[in-house]
Amino acid sequence: MRKIILVAGATGNLGERIVRALIDKGAEVRIVVRSGSKIEKINKLEKLGVKVYKLHHWNVEELTQACLEVSCVVSSLAGLREVIIDAQTVLLDAAIAAGVPRFIPSDYSLDFTKFAFGENRNLDLRREFHEYLDKTPIAATTIFNGAFADMLTGQMPVILFKQKLVLYWGNADDRWDFTTMDDTAAYTANAAIDISTPRYLRIAGDQISPRQIREVVNKVTKNKFRLIRAGGQGLLGLIIKIARKIAPGEKELYPAWQGMQYMHNMIDKRSKIDTPDNSRYPEIHWTSVKDLLTAYQESISFASTS
Ligand SMILES: NC(=O)c1ccc[n+]([C@@H]2O[C@H](COP(=O)([O-])OP(=O)(O)OC[C@H]3O[C@@H](n4cnc5c(N)ncnc54)[C@H](OP(=O)(O)O)[C@@H]3O)[C@@H](O)[C@H]2O)c1
């Protein structure tokens, strides 16, 4: 029998990819959307063949109806406390009320289980949610994927294409964990269908150091990038404290200091994924940073010639 998987956050960047991956795997997919979610996004998802539950209110009653007969609820919600704690708790309570056996929370991050409260504001919210989640009878599985590799072509200030620099904090030879959004989505879809997943699954599409990133960028772009060390973890910690004081942005999801907190965690050995669970689903072809940058370079070259 086809498994029914419900995705919350399907109108988002990762969520849509999870939906596509689930459909590729032959699952029956339901999505729950808010009345204010963008209609174009909903229509696009509906065309893929998902069943849309348009909620008037994000409450346990309405969500429970959507969760009936579902075998796993996958959350890819993004936001601060009102989303990761409040909205996700309502979703979880509804899943439990409907008798859903499994739940994948919206974590998709570096492994924060080894960090203490206060080291990363956004990840603290996930840890707080886990405190509630782990007291419920539902079988939960968190996917830890390091950083989304896709961010290397823009959002993450590591490869500075214009300046031809690879900027890093910490040690040039420490490897960082990266997984593309598509690979994370494919893995999550597999995990959603798999009935015997453990509490935590850790994946890394590539584990690569800043020095190796420079080699790859040089090869792919046929340029000479310089490797520049911004400083150590201590200095980064200090800058985070100052940045949070002078430009707080506490209500924003990704103020500058929040990005720095992710970097601070990423260069910390505690976040390192020692034995990734990549081979659990052998059908996934993992995208390396080289694959990603090659595709990016090709898209730029194509755009400049067309
Ligand atoms: N490891 C990494 O490097 C990395 C990087 C980025 C993100 N992530 C993680 O990936 C996950 C998904 O992020 P994303 O970038 O795909 O997010 P996104 O594109 O911003 O999508 C967020 C989704 O959450 C929904 N949502 C927001 N507030 C809601 C609420 N109050 N009630 C119900 N639904 C709500 C949105 O629905 P509407 O369309 O209705 O607004 C949307 O579907 C998050 O856990 C995020 O932290 C990880």
Image: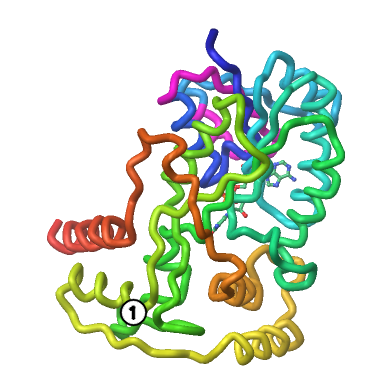
Amino acid, disc 1:
Arg
Residue 221 left/right relative to 213:
left
**What range of the chain is rendered magenta?**
24-45
User: In what element is the residue under mark 1?
Assistant: helix
Instruction: Determine which quarter of the picture holds residue 289.
Output: bottom left
Q: Is residue 247 above or below residue 284?
A: below
Q: Is residue 80 above or below residue 22?
A: below
Q: Residue at x 60, y 24 (%)?
A: 195
Q: Residue at x 81, y 26 (%)?
A: 96
User: Which quadrant of the rendered structure holds the C terminus?
Assistant: bottom left
Q: Which of 242/247 is in front?
A: 242
x, y percent for residue 119: 72, 72
x, y percent for residue 117: 79, 68
x, y percent for residue 12: 56, 44
Instruction: Determine which quarter of the picture holds residue 74.
Output: top right
Residue 8 lies in the magenta-colored region: no
User: Which quadrant of the rendered structure holds the N terminus?
Assistant: top right
Q: Is residue 242 above or below residue 269?
A: below
x, y percent for residue 232: 55, 89
Residue 40 shows in the view: no
Residue identifier under label 1: 211
Number of labelled discs?
1
Q: Residues within 10 Å of mark 1 (few under 14, many from 20)?
A: some
Residue 122 left/right relative to 205:
right
Instruction: Determine which quarter of the picture holds residue 21.
Output: top left
Residue 44 lies in the magenta-colored region: yes
Residue 26 shows in the view: yes
Q: Residue at x 40, y 53 (%)?
A: 205
Q: Is residue 211 above or below residue 242?
A: above
